[in-house]
Image (tube, helix red, strand yellow):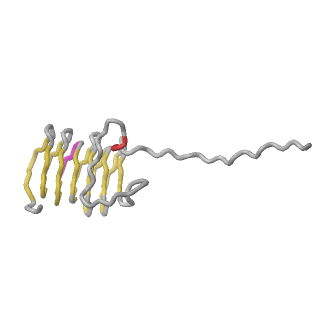
Amino acid sequence: MADTAPTPAPFRPDLVRRPAAAELPGSKPAAMPTGAPATKGGPDPKTLIVGREISLNGQITACDRLVVEGKVEASLSDSRFVEIAETGMFKGNAEIEEADIRGRFEGKLSVGGRLLIRSTGKVVGEIRYGQIEIELGGQISGTVETTGRI
């Protein structure tokens, strides 16, 4: 009788997906912009996530959704939605449709639609908005005016 050893299964490492901020225990679900497409299996192709302890400098354009968990110093234009997490900091200029601020924004912010400043959020600078909602504890300072557009 011949000794035949079983053939070992091929090595197939499983990649572990990093949970989004909204999936972490104790975190609040992130608000999605009105009319944002719901996707299964991950973010939209035009979503940029700047993770914790990551710094990004430069210009960002044509981004449907920007999620800031780290630090961004940039000019943001032609974008729809910005979410700044509690750990996030955005410094610069942003022209967007909707914003959800849990962290800190410094600079010039122009939101054509809804600006939501959460209880942990702080916005400082020149702010223009279509609609605004500030949760108890949220902070805003600087030049603030409405765009007159709702």
Percent across and percent down for residue 34 are: 24, 58
Write the residue at 36% across / 43% down: 23
User: Where 143 sits versus 96, above or below?
Assistant: above
Write the residue at 10% across / 47% down: 142
Percent across and percent down for residue 2 are: 90, 44
Write the residue at 30% across / 48% down: 68
Camera-nearest residue between 6 and 97: 6
Percent across and percent down for residue 14 are: 55, 46
Camera-nearest residue between 82 and 95: 82
Name the magenta segment's main secondary structure: strand
Camera-nearest residue between 31 and 95: 31
Q: In this view, does 139 lie to the left or right of 64?
A: left
Across the whole image, how many numbered discs are drawn on residues?
A: 0
Outermost right residue: 1
Q: Quadrant of residue 120?
A: top left
Q: Quadrant of residue 5?
A: top right
Which residues, given as a range, are shown in magenta?
A: 103-107
Q: Is residue 43 left or right of residue 118?
A: right
User: Where 150 sits versus 11, above or below?
Assistant: below
Q: In which quarter of the image is the C terminus?
A: bottom left
Specify whether residue 99 is painted magenta: no
Q: Quadrant of the N terminus?
A: top right
Outermost front residue: 1
User: Where 83 sits versus 27, above or below?
Assistant: below
Q: Quadrant of residue 96?
A: bottom left
Write the residue at 35% across / 54% down: 48
Camera-nearest residue between 105 and 65: 65
Percent across and percent down for residue 6 are: 77, 44
